[in-house]
Every structure is written in C-alpha cells, then in structure tokens.
Image (cartoon, helix red, strand yellow):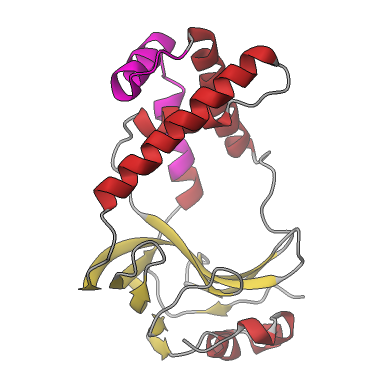
Amino acid sequence: MENNPFVLNVSGGQIAYIHGHVSTTDDSIKNRKFQVSTHVRSRQIALEDQVFNGLDVLTVHATLVSRTSCNFPIDAVSKAIQGIQSKIENRKTGKTRGGPIETIPVAIDVNGRPVLRMVKNQKTGEWSLLLGPVEQMKAETVKEGTVDHEAENNRKFHGSIERASTQVEKWFDNPEKQSLNALEALIRKVTPLPKAPQIRSFTLIGKGAIKCDSISIGGQRFTDMLSVVETFRPDLLALLNQKEAVSV
C-alpha cells in the first residue's frame, strides 16, 4: 500500500475539532479543539528523561512513605527507578516493543506532520483509523459527567499501592523473574512532572472508537467516520472492517 497521504492546506493553529465527544469515563460531553503538535514524541521523552533520570533513591523513598504510608524497601525502589530509566532510554533509541505492525498516513499538514493515520494491530491484523497525536487547545463542556473524579482517583491510587505492595513481596522471593512495573507506575504517580501540553490520540474507526456528534478536519465536517477515509484516502477503504465503520 502506497504511503500517499492527503495534504491538508493547514500549517498551524486549529486543525481538528471533535463535536459532542462522549467520555468513556464519566459520560460527560465536550467539544474539543486540537492543533498538530510539533515533535510530540521527542518532547515527551525529553521531559521524562529530565525528571526521572535525575531521581534520587532516598528522595523517592521518602516521597512514597509520605504519599502512601508504605515503607517500601530501598532495594525495590532502586530497582524500580532503574526500570523507569531503562524504559525511557529504550524510547529514546526506538527499542520499545509493541506498536502497530504497519502505519499508513491518511492526512498530513503542509509540513508533513500526521493528522490522520491508519494503524494495523500487531495481534489481530485489524486496521483502525486514528486522529493524532494532536495537542488539545481547548475543551468546552457541553454536559457534566456523572462520576466523582476525586473519589475515583483516590480509589485508583489506593489500588496502585496495593498492586505495588503485592508485587514487591513476590519480587523478594524471585527477583530475577518478577517485574516491578506496578511499583514503577506508583513512582510515576507520586513524582511531580512539569506541566506539559495535553497530547491526545483518538480512534475514529476500530476497536475502542470514540462516540461523538461529528468531527471537523482541515475545515471539512464529517458526521460518520467512514466518510473521512472516503474523502482523504478512498484507496484505503478496503482495509477497514465495514462492520466497525458505524456512523456516530
């Protein structure tokens, strides 16, 4: 399949708008505006590299005790920090596992930055249509959600503590094989990061596709997602499972 994307006549500013986006977390409805983000991946990696590669084990341990009331062993904390730093280094060098088998650009801006892309799931072989990565400029609430986010965040945080504690106990019995990824995740939660742009990606067609009223891309508005592909890359329609290309 040729990588011959449609070039949108846009070089900056607002490039996409999701109208009536229904959140899967609390059923709230928002209108979201986006711009194409420059050097998304490298910016995120550089930010994490700056913060996590400067971590001091004793400081992290003290923060964990303060935030969780759990006295995680220093050896486990040190090992988890090494795991975080190793993952960041792998991202910098492109050695991370996973990701799509194949990516095909559907639409790009005039500077060649992707706005829409088709990705192939490496396990199922199915194709999805994705918007992004894009930088959120504004989110306007149309309908408030039904979830107490503070209570939900507290519940998730305590769940993270329990998973990390259980994992550390197993790690002491089998340090060569037992992962500490739950403790790594907990360290990430309690480590303050500088404020960064909100980078988002949305599945428009495929598993996990969003629900919305319509989407505007490069000045064109669409009420169903299949028409997005029909407009920008009709040659890719055959790759999509027609049963998943449902109007919204």
Q: Looking at the image, which residue is at 33% across and 62% down?
A: 136
Whether residue 53 appears in magenta in the rendering, the answer is: yes
Image-quadrant location for residue 239: bottom right
Q: Position of residue 41 (x, y in %)?
A: 50, 48
Q: Position of residue 241 (x, y in %)?
A: 70, 82
Q: Can residue 94 be seen in this view?
A: yes
Classify 52 as above or below 95. above
Q: Can residue 49 be seen in this view?
A: no
Please name the predominant secondary structure of the magenta segment in the image. Answer: helix
- Who is closer to the viewer here, 168 or 91? 168
**Along the horizontal axis of the image, is 112 left or right of 26?**
right
Numbered disc total: 0
Classify 62 as above or below 41. above
Image-quadrant location for residue 65: top left
Whether residue 65 appears in magenta in the rendering, the answer is: yes
- Range of the magenta residues? 44-72
- Who is closer to the viewer here, 55 or 37? 55
Classify 23 as above or below 42. below
Q: Where is residue 30 in the image (x, y as percent from the top left)?
A: 29, 72
Q: Looking at the image, which residue is at 33% across and 51% down?
A: 197
Q: Position of residue 63 (x, y in %)?
A: 33, 19
- Who is closer to the viewer here, 137 or 127? 127
Q: Looking at the image, which residue is at 68% across and 24% down?
A: 178
Classify 216 as above or below 186. below
Image quarter (top left, top right, bottom left or bottom right) of the N terminus: bottom right
- Who is closer to the viewer here, 190 or 134? 190
Image-quadrant location for residue 13: bottom left
Q: Looking at the image, which residue is at 29% across and 18% down?
A: 66
